Image: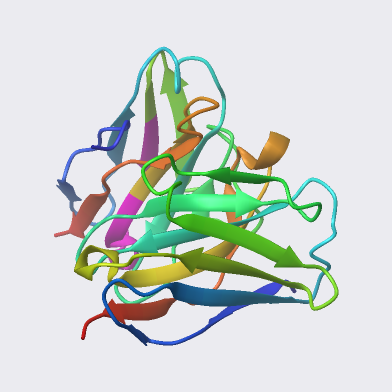
Amino acid sequence: QSALTQPASVSGSPGQSITIFCSGASSDIGSYDLVSWYQQHPGKAPKLMIYEVTKRPSGVSNRFSGSKSGNTASLTISGLQAEDEADYYCCSYVDTRTYVVFGGGTKLTVL
Amino acid sequence: QLQLQESGPGLVKPSETLSLTCTVSGGSIRSSSYYWGWIRQPPGKGLEWIGNIYSNGNTYYNPSLKSRVTISVDTSKNQFSLRLSSVTAADTAVYYCARQVGYYGSGSLDYWGQGTLVTVSS
């Protein structure tokens, strides 16, 4: 039902890089630079990792980076560490009716 | 450091109204440019944006919940609240409050409460 589509799971080995894609439409991701990404560890509140497509909040590791191409946003994590194992959600403004939606979430496993 | 804390009953009966309050500390809910939002997460599932409110009472709601949701603000107490009517088991979830930035609250959620589990059951 989400307007944003993410893969259910991705995995990578320590030290590797992975990318999580968030697919939307020309009317949401394609039209606005309002994509944000959240990391959620089990039993914890989500944590903002990327906002406005590419910006990192203070305190977030520079191993996390965001980008957008057309209707798809992406989150790249470089130099994977065990602590990066978590669920990741994209989020975007959609339109004046739907307003804001989250992607379905992606479970990252560090092998 | 801004902190948000949800409070309210952890158990609600079907068909009744769920009521939660978020208390903001370390900053004013009247701060310009910020909306204050609610997000929920059913057990084992993803995040769902419920809606948000500005300090002047302006609100935006998820259209799928709009008919049952009311978000209100009490600036004198630095709190905002969620009411969800006619609840069913499908409304069982961890409910989070958060600060939402950007133009008319359309941007990212940068500060979150710890979340509170609300179970709908008789």
At horizontal 65% and vertical 42% (from top left) the residue drawn is B105
In percent of width and height, residue A4 lies at 32, 32
Does any portion of residue A79 appear in the rendered image?
no
Q: Quadrant of the N terminus of chain A?
A: top left
In the rendered image, residue A39 lying in the magenta stretch gets the answer no
Q: In which quarter of the image is the C terminus of chain A?
A: bottom left
Start-end of magenta stretch: A74-88
Seen in the image, is A67 located left or right of residue A10?
right
In percent of width and height, residue B22 lies at 61, 74
At horizontal 75% and vertical 74% (from top left) the residue drawn is B1
Instruction: Report the front residue among A84 and B27.
Output: B27
Instruction: Report the front residue among A13 and B38.
Output: B38
In percent of width and height, residue A64 lies at 46, 46
Seen in the image, is A33 located left or right of residue A68?
right
Instruction: Report the front residue among B118 and A42.
Output: B118
Seen in the image, is A1 located left or right of residue B58?
left
Q: In this view, does A26 lie above or below A68?
A: above
Q: In this view, does B118 lie above or below B66?
A: below
In percent of width and height, residue A87 lies at 29, 57
Q: In which quarter of the image is residue A108?
A: bottom left
Seen in the image, is A49 located left or right of residue B102?
left
Does any portion of residue A83 appear in the rendered image?
yes
In the rendered image, residue A77 lying in the magenta stretch gets the answer yes
At horizontal 38% and vertical 87% (from top left) the residue drawn is B10
At horizontal 26% and vertical 45% (from top left) the residue drawn is A104
